[in-house]
Amino acid sequence: MSPADAAGPADVVVALDVGGTGMKCALVRPDGTTVHTERHPTDAGRGPDAVVETILDVAEGLAGKARADGRDPVALGIAVPGVVDEAAGVAVWSANVGFRDVPLRGLAEERLGLPHPQLGALPLELGQPTLLLLRLTQHALDGAVE
């Protein structure tokens, strides 16, 4: 049985695609259906600490929206530009947002309390953020639905 098959009817993954100027965000069902989208400025010029706070604020807001709509946020996926150590959950380097060894997965886990947050690098040269978010969603669900 796949994680999507085991998920409840109200389960959603909080998904963020972080760029240097903006974030594309969504609540995504395990079958890949998007149930809500929104965009937010990244304002990377404020520095990496401010960007991290913005990411966490937006993710927390999306999880709250999911709950207010009767949905259950079961996991979190964050795609960031640059080099990412996915196993450690660390944004190693990103020129776009100024990240240097940011333990984003741990910070998200601590702040949101969602199980199994996943962090991935956005392949800028490929321009495939939707595929990455779907992959992160699948990884998040693999951990959340056992």
Image (cartoon, rainbow, N blue to C red):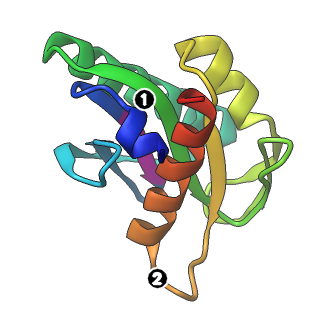
- Residue placed furthest toward the front: 1
Q: Residue at x 37, y 23 (%)?
A: 73
- Which labelled disc corresponds to residue 59? 1
CA distance for labels 1 and 2:
22 Å
Task: Give the prevailing secondary structure in the magenta stretch.
Answer: strand
- The answer to whether 102 is drawn above or below residue 60 in the figure is below
Mark 1 and mark 2 residues within 8 Å of each other at the beta carbon: no
- The answer to whether 60 is drawn above or below residue 123 in the figure is above
Which corner quadrant of the image does residue 50 belong to? Answer: top right
Q: Quarter of the image for the C terminus: give it.
A: top right
Question: Which element carries disc 1, helix, strand or loop?
Answer: helix
Q: Where is residue 27 in the image (x, y as percent from the top left)?
A: 28, 39
- Which labelled disc corresponds to residue 127? 2
Question: Which element carries disc 2, helix, strand or loop?
Answer: loop
What amino acid type should be assigned to the residue bearing mark 1?
Answer: Ala
Q: Where is residue 88 in the image (x, y as percent from the top left)?
A: 86, 42
User: For this rendering, which residue is in front, 8 or 90?
Assistant: 8
Q: Where is residue 75 in the image (x, y as percent from the top left)?
A: 49, 30
What amino acid type should be assigned to the residue bearing mark 2?
Answer: Gly
Q: What stretch is highlighted in magenta?
A: 13-17
Relative horizontal placement of residue 8, taking residue 19 as reference (left or right) = left
- Residue placed furthest toward the bottom: 125
Q: Where is residue 104 in the image (x, y as percent from the top left)?
A: 70, 35
Q: Does the magenta stretch include residue 15?
A: yes
